[in-house]
Image (spheres, grey):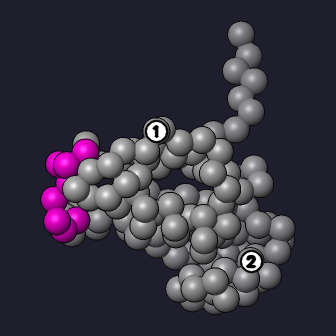
Amino acid sequence: MTLGALGMTPLISVFDMPTAVRFYREILGFDLVSASPEVQTREGTFSHWVWLRHGQAQLMLNTQFDSNERPEENDPARVAAHGDTVLYIGCANVDDAFDELTRRGLRADAPTMAPYGLRHFSTKDPDGYIIVFQEAR
């Protein structure tokens, strides 16, 4: 049997769904594909799960806590632990992507050339996940 995989869609946990969705949609330019029904909680109104897409890149977000169970502050140790998860996004032109995304408010160092032939730059999302934008040259 052949897998015949057509892509991959990682699922990551987020502390504050509205903040995460704003980051991925307004700054990175992802579109909403689907979402669970919105809930009204003491934390606000949001979906516990969303599916996002930008070109061929897909990502799902899920809340870390059920309704009315989220603590006031995110656990710094949990955010630091997300640093071992890296999401790589391929770009047709990484320099143009950097210019556009930083105009939208993304904070990142300028693209550099890696010794293995990829031009790239990186940032972190609000939950501490590393996102690398790369272009093979």
Going by the image, does 133 lie left or right of 124?
right
Residue 51 location, quadrant: top right
Q: Where is the C terminus found, in terms of image quarters?
A: bottom right
| Residue drawn where x is 26% and y is 58% of the image | 43
> Which residues lie in the magenta part?
67-74
Residue 133 location, quadrant: bottom right
Going by the image, does 79 lie left or right of 30?
left
Near mark 2 (Cα within 10 A), the count class, few <14, some 14-19 or many ≥20, is some
Q: Which of marks 2 and 1 is nearer the N terminus?
A: 1
Going by the image, does 116 lie left or right of 125?
right
Check disc 2 and give the amino acid type.
Ala
Q: Where is the N terminus found, in terms of image quarters?
A: top right
Say the numbered circle drawn on residue 16: none
| Residue drawn where x is 77% and y is 66% of the image | 91
Query: Residue 111: where, in percent of width, then height?
Result: 67, 84
Element under disc 1: loop
Residue 87 location, quadrant: bottom right
Check disc 1 and give the amino acid type.
Pro
Q: 58 and 46: which one is in front?
A: 46
| Residue drawn where x is 67% and y is 56% of the image | 31
Q: 119 and 51: which one is in front?
A: 51
Residue 68 in magenta? Answer: yes
Query: Residue 53: where, in percent of width, then height?
Result: 67, 51
Q: Can residue 74 be seen in this view?
A: yes
Element under disc 2: helix
- Residue bearing the label numbered 2: 97
- Residue bearing the label numbered 1: 37
